Image (cartoon, rainbow, N blue to C red):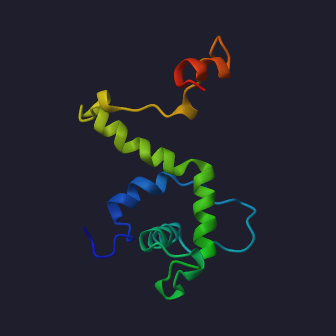
Amino acid sequence: MSTRPWIVHDDLWALIEPLLPPWPERSPGPRPVADRLGLQGILYVLHNDIAWQLLPLELGFGSGQTCWRRLERWQKAGLFEQLHRIPLAELNAAGELDWSRACVDGPHIRAKKCPYGFRQAVAVVGGW
């Protein structure tokens, strides 16, 4: 592992760059820092567990506010969900995922309604 894990190497950047949403056409002013540097700033803040406003400008990643806005914009665009799916798809295609240990998170699967209502179901299950 690198001594600076927030540095985005070329092979990783080649995977991420096509997934980035286009820069808004009517954004005020020029883009302050390159997307790659913005990502490195985000990773620096997360790795070092510091507040956004404490991101050192000397590193060239832009301000903490710039990086935070970029993170928010990318999150809303679904970048990280897409990025998560790429290695999963590759591992699945190679047969290297053990789906028997998969877990389904509640917010993604609709729960069936209990025919007895909430209180009766809890009374039966938990003795409320």
The residue sitting at 30% across, 33% down in the picture is: 92
Q: Does residue 2 appear in this view?
A: yes
Image quarter in which the C terminus is found: top right
View extreme (front): residue: 127
Whether residue 78 is situated above or below residue 90 in the rendered picture:
below
- The reply, left or right, for residue 111 in relation to residue 5 is right
- Of 30 and 60, which appears nearest the observer? 60
Residue 9 drawn at (x, y percent)? 34, 66
The residue sitting at 33% across, 59% down in the picture is: 11
- The reply, left or right, for residue 122 in relation to residue 101 is right
- Of 76 and 17, which appears nearest the observer? 76
Residue 79 drawn at (x, y percent)? 53, 50
Residue 61 drawn at (x, y percent)? 51, 78
Whether residue 57 is situated above or below residue 91 in the rendered picture:
below
Q: Does residue 32 appear in this view?
A: no
- Of 15 and 78, which appears nearest the observer? 78
- Of 97 and 48, which appears nearest the observer? 48
Image quarter in which the N terminus is found: bottom left
Whether residue 31 is situated above or below residue 11 in the rendered picture:
below
* Count of numbered badges drawn on the protein: 0
